[in-house]
Amino acid sequence: MPLWKGRFQKELDKQTNDFNASISFDSRMAQQDIRGSIAHATMLGRQGIIDEAESGKIVAALRQIALELESGKLAIDRTAEDIHTFVEAELTKRIGDSGKRLHTARSRNDQVALDLRLYLLDESEKLEASLNRLLRVITAKAKETYDFVMPGYTHLQRAQPITFGHHLLAYGDMLLRDRARLQDCKKRMAVSPLGSGALAGTTYPLDRGFAAAQLGLTGVSSNSLDGVSDRDYVLELLSCLSILMVHLSRFAEEVILWCSWEFKFVELDDAFSTGSSIMPQKKNPDIAELVRGKAGRVFGDLMTMLTVMKGLPLAYNKDMQEDKQAVFDAMDTAVICLDTFAPMLETARVLKDNLRAAAAGGFINATDCADYLVGKGLPFRDAYKCTGELVAACIEQGLTLETLPLEQYKAACDLFGEDVYQAIDLDACVNRRTVKGAPAPANVLREIAALEEKI
Ligand code: ARG
């Protein structure tokens, strides 16, 4: 039976009832709903709004319901309108009239706003744990590969030498920012709307701060209309998740490229790749592709909620019930992507020789060659032009800067000497990149230690 039976003469039309109900998806907030109700009932008793003994009875019964739901002894009634209705009905079934006093000075509007905040705060813990796990995998892989020389790219063209560990740590920085964004967003989520009532607060002498503190929240909302109609915490979380998915998607894209025969920088473990039903030779990076694809889904969830919210007059409107599926989907998706990506990366083999071969073939030491001339006193722009001409000569003769004879160097510029070969040696080029944030192996080791500290 709905909670709002009073003025209605007829049952709700069957299809409309299903359309209106949210139990199929909001039942996952059962524990948070009960926690919120326990805090509310305790506060009502403490303030003398309901009898203390009755408050105690409500709290005890709610605790019992929570336990039974958790153990599976009690099943959620799927015909209830929503989780709030179910819990209240179950409570009243157990303790009669006392149960009917729980909703004093409360509306489902402030109740659902509270439940969703509590639920998302709990889920954020899981997300953070998953983020940390991937960060630890990145750290471990970076340790393995801190001195693996590879070409760094711009425009997907070989640019300058870096190390694989350094490349991985770039994703470490992105994920650290994701974690910081999430932590920041949680600050605003941890505010209690309870006491906002339906929209206009309440005439009862509530102690809103007490209820909030009981729930581990840091404060109470200051405007009752905003309290029930604010879904910024959903939008912020979805934004954080979307940015996180941008990062995972870019990482996935690189894994996909690296697995291709054109690159072959990385070999995924069989346990994290799939085959083709027709092409026997295939080993596909489906997992990375799915992560890349699921980013679209999370962006869609963000777009859903921006669009749901943008035209809503104050205060609560039923449109807002749509918030749950969108944010649940985004949260579930991000967590599963992190949890699948981490072991895939952990078990991947990084093919050091292939990285090296790619680094040796693409003139990625040309900048270093120009810098060599700068060291001999030539202005950089002239050194740049001279090196460019040497690269063109190499390409024409099928040579590299390493194999170009010294006479040709000298013919281009008499500042060149035998030591040019040492200056353009790939390891030397990488080892020299020691400025803060650069890919020299010694730097990478320091950055790994710093990252470990932060995790
Ligand atoms: N299931 C509803 C939701 O998710 C609960 C709030 C209902 N409030 C109301 N005034 N009908 O938003």
Image: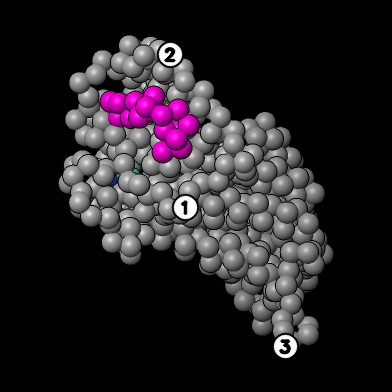
Q: Please say whether residue 127 is visible from this viewpoint.
A: yes
Amino acid type for the residue under numbered disc 2: Ala
253 lies above or below 399: above
- x then y, percent, for residue 217: 43, 24
Q: Tell me if 453 is positioned left or right of 386 in this view.
A: right
**Residue located beneath label 2 in the image:** 53
Amino acid type for the residue under numbered disc 1: Arg
State yes or no: discs 3 and 1 in contact (Cβ < 8 Å).
no
Q: Is residue 53 magenta?
A: no
**Residue located beneath label 1 in the image:** 78
- x then y, percent, for residue 40: 39, 24
Residue 7 image-quadrant placement: top left
Residue 166 versus residue 238: which sits nearer the camera? Answer: 238
Q: Tell me if 110 is positioned left or right of 95 in this view.
A: left
Q: Tell me if 280 is positioned left or right of 133 in this view.
A: right
Report crowding for label 2: few under 14, some 14 to 19, many 20 or more residues within 10 A (C-alpha). Answer: few
Kindly identify the residue that appears in the image at 41 percent across and 49 percent down: 80
Residue 12 versus residue 151: which sits nearer the camera? Answer: 12
- x then y, percent, for residue 339: 65, 51
Residue 257 versus residue 421: which sits nearer the camera? Answer: 257
**Residue located beneath label 3 in the image:** 278
Q: Earlier in the sequence, mark 2 or mark 1?
A: 2
Residue 391 versus residue 203: which sits nearer the camera? Answer: 203
Q: Is mark 3 within 8 Å of ligand 1?
A: no
Q: Please say whether residue 387 is visible from this viewpoint.
A: no
Kindly report the distance in space between the C-alpha atoms of the residues bearing marks 2 and 1: 31 Å
- x then y, percent, for residue 206: 29, 17
